Image (cartoon, grey):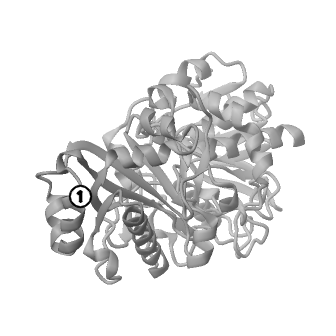
Amino acid sequence: MILNDLNNINNNFFSVIIIGSGPAGISTALKLEELNVRTLLIEAGGLELDPESEDFLKGNIYAEDYYDISVRRARMFGGTSNLWGGHCNKFEKEQFNNWPIDYDELHSFEDEAKKVLGLKFYHTDFYIKKFNEDFNQYNTRFSDKSRNFKDVYYDKIKNSNYIYLSLNTSFLHFEGDKNNINSIYCRKKSNFYSLKAKYFVLAAGGIENSRLLLWSKEKNKRLFDDNLPIGKYYMDHPYYDPAEGFIKYDKVASYLNETKGRSREFYVDCYNRVNLSPNLKFRNERNIDSLTFFWNFNHKSASNSSYIKKLTCMSPNIIKNFLLRENIEDLINFKISINQEQEPEVNNRITLSNDLDPYGTPLINLTWKMSNKMKRCAKENLLRLGKFLVDKDMGRIAINEDIFSYDNFKTKLNAGHQMGGTCAGKNKLSSVVDKNLKVHSINNLFVTGSSVFTTGGHGNPTYTIVLLSLKLADHIKKII
């Protein structure tokens, strides 16, 4: 149901108020509807993106090679699903070891998450397979129609008897005392409201969750524990193209076909690529975190390629010997792209700025830096992949020179996967929410979305966001 007027709201009517209508907020609301829980969903934007909304999303960035955060966020119904390409994949189980949440319990909601996201599996589910002694091969699935939540779920929510949606309603801060949230203070048009419920869910996005909690803490310091590390341990996925080369395509296909079912996945991928990640053994051996290699094949002859020229300059004898044995017309180009895990570091953080948004709430300062460990991780993985190609005589790889220099290392681009800031954990000195996504020391406030990620993994976060939100809704139903 759509609420155009909040003046006549009965403050005992809603069991739950959810702040934010992106994938996290909508997934939570849909599950609560299924459980017959009456929910108010508030969204700061409307059905279309207002250019002036960027004034609420700006911030001061203290980082090299970082993007404009105002264009990677969407203040509108559906949130960042309006900017999303539909990519979904899942955490590897061992990457979940430091989370307070049980991996198997969380993934008991997989069937529901796939339905919410519109994931289609033609002949196989998500998988992680051994590629060689150092790398696993995994697959990515895509939601139908890129699963824009606005187009898919607006009419459903409009006709719901349990979900009430108020658009153009800006959350300002929480109100409460004695470890309880009593109400949220918000603005719709030029009017201000205090809205009450039994439970509250903050699902405003990877950056906004921290901003709104930090401001609520400033407005009501007695309500929040001063030791909560709100805004700290911020993470992203550095994404860049650090290498290129050429391969004998038939040799790669033959290698993939050695394990039953692998080549089928290789050929059906609409991006014509193989996704690789370092296995646990290799990561432990080299003391590195994880990443994704997107090994993208061009299917064009390498005969006139700049790759050949670059490789010839780097290793003339090796390339000469290789080309003497191969027909160059049978070689194809490839490019390596990396999506890299960033370890949680306390100095990567979100804080409040002195600059204000149009409604008087502070904007953010974002401090972000790649560690030398991350840079070493990229180098170690690329060198190991290059060794594999040489050992199997499949091709050769040219690695960008800046990979070998920490000072000149450039990522060029980040994936826009804003994670952390309200991390889940057992200790309130190093986390903001517990295993049930409840804010430490507050009885009725929950946070969901990528901001609660304890670690970032190497994959796209949306699938895990939806799993967390479904689990949260199930938990709320049990305690109401």
Q: Choose between 396 and 211: the one closer to the eye.
A: 396
Examine the image and state in which quarter residue 410 appears.
bottom left
Residue farthest front in this picture: 325
Q: Residue at x 57, y 57 (%)?
A: 212
Residue farthest left in this picture: 304
Q: Choose between 365 and 292: the one closer to the eye.
A: 292
Query: What residue is pinned by disc 1?
Result: 325
Crowding near the residue tagged with mark 1, few <14, some 14–19, many ≥20 C-alpha atoms within 10 Å: few
Q: Is residue 128 left or right of residue 176?
A: left
Q: Amino acid at mark 1?
A: Arg
**Do we see residue 190 in this rendering?**
no
Q: Position of residue 36 (x, y in %)?
A: 80, 25
Quadrant in which the C terminus is drawn: top right
Q: Position of residue 130 (x, y in %)?
A: 59, 53
Q: SS class of the residue under badge 1? A: helix
Q: Residue at x 75, y 56 (%)?
A: 176
Q: Please, is residue 441 above or below residue 284 in the view? A: above
Q: Is residue 188 left or right of residue 474?
A: left
Q: Position of residue 285 (x, y in %)?
A: 60, 77
